[in-house]
Amino acid sequence: MKNRRKIETQEERQNRHKAMESVAILDKLKNDFSKPLEAMDYFYDLFERVYCKRESLHERSVKVGTLCIQVPYEIIYALDAVPVRLCNGFHTDDEIGSDFAPSKACPLVKATVGQFSSGNFVDRPDLVVSPTTCDQKSKAGAIIESMGYPIYDMEFPRTKESEESREYWRRSVRKFAKDLSKELGVKLTRNKLKKTIQRIGYAQYLYHRLNTLRKSDNPPILGVDMFLVTNAFFFDRLESWIEAVERLVEECAAKTEEESATYQNSPRIVYTGSPPIFPNLKIPLLIEQSDGLIVADETCSSNRMFNDMISVDEWFLYDMVDSISDKYLKGCTCPIFTKNSDRIRRIINLVKEYHAEGVVYQAFAGCQVYEMEQRSVLGAMEKEGIPILYLESDYSPSHLGQLTTRIEAFIESLKNRRRKKACAIS
């Protein structure tokens, strides 16, 4: 008999391409930098298991997919479900999503829609929650619903300063808690909600400890590794993530006390703009391969999601729900708000707190809110005397040469600025 060559299905081809994207990034993270942290092996292995080997982490759990960090994880966990953020960083899915969204749309939105169109999930969501934050994500929710996925639209205000917007969002979160409880057939109880608030609060505490260590003259961890850690929070088992970060904090604390500073001479960068979602860590990698060091960020895929902890006055059920809603609104610095002075103030504070020497602002091509806001952010940085580099990119692996040249020139300018300051002091 003649050997018949197996015909590769579209899903198999897509999985192979996504695995190739993942492996390429993981190899760079593991091999392109000196003195890797041993505790990061958990996260490298996690992404390899999920994105390359397609291992399910939540096979027996009810999965609530989220399209934004404004969906309260505390409520989902308290209802015995698992939140899985569905924002997508694969160029392979971006190309598929172009059949359903305009070519000039945000690549993150196109990639997310592309994954839904193929139905190619490791952990397929049982319900998808779509907050009405970004316009493109709001419309993407309608496209996803037309594909047969159950969508829950969670209304989000476009201002946050007024008492009206605060109450509007509180009502939205209360309604979400009631509707999700009914949908899942699980009662939301005071004890369960209190427990999940405290557990996620502990996860935030660990993340803040890591960030505090990054303020030192001897930063113990790369920015790309921090992005991987926070991206893992999107889909990992909560307890596993907490245990892994505990080990990471312990190792980083010991590393800051070492005499040899691995990244001490690298210019310190604050990263802001469109969120780096694995495996699209293209710009952060280029920065740190060019001898820059990302010491802090203001993005919704990392620092912003852990910013503020929930402050509860009374541990009664709906007092806790209101406290959750306040945390998600007041701490949000997303550019979708009509006024956004909080975000500019946050970036400036990060530069000062982390002794950063410059800011890199990345906007995805087609992400209008970040593209429109960059002028005001650049103006504010210039007023403060903070060097800033604005980059526009997409998920494509092309244009790396041009991006590398601009980033290397910016890093070198920061080094020259440092040398001039040293000469002026001496």
Image (spheres, grey):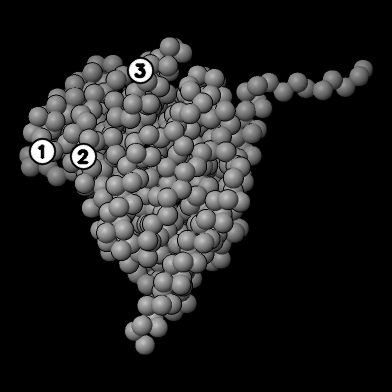
Which quadrant, please, contains the C terminus? bottom left
Determine whether the residue tagged by mark 2 lies in a helix, strand or loop.
loop
Q: Secondary structure at mark 3?
A: strand
Q: Could you give the CA–CA distance between mark 3 and mark 2, rounded to whole angstroms?
A: 29 Å
> Residue 237: where, in percent of width, then height?
40, 39
Q: Are marks 3 and 2 in contact (CB under 8 Å)?
A: no
Q: Nearer the viewer, residue 261 or 371?
A: 371
Disc 1 designates what residue?
315
Name the image quarter holding the N terminus. top right
Circle 2 packing at 10 Å, graded few (<14), some (14-19), many (20+), is some
Numbered tag placed on residue 151 in the rendering: 3
Q: Is residue 308 above or below residue 5?
A: below
The kind of residue on which mark 3 rests is: Ile
Closer to the N terminus: mark 3 or mark 2? 3
Amino acid type assigned to the residue bearing label 1 in the image:
Trp
The residue located at (84%, 20%) in the rendering is 4
Q: Which circle, 2 or 1, is nearer the viewer?
A: 2
The residues tagged by marks 3 and 1 sit, at their Cα atoms, a distance apart of 31 Å
200 and 23: which is toward the camera: 23
Say which residue label 2 marks.
339
| Numbered circle sitting on residue 164 | none
The residue lying at 48 percent from left, 63 percent from top is: 411
Name the front one of labels 3 and 2: 2
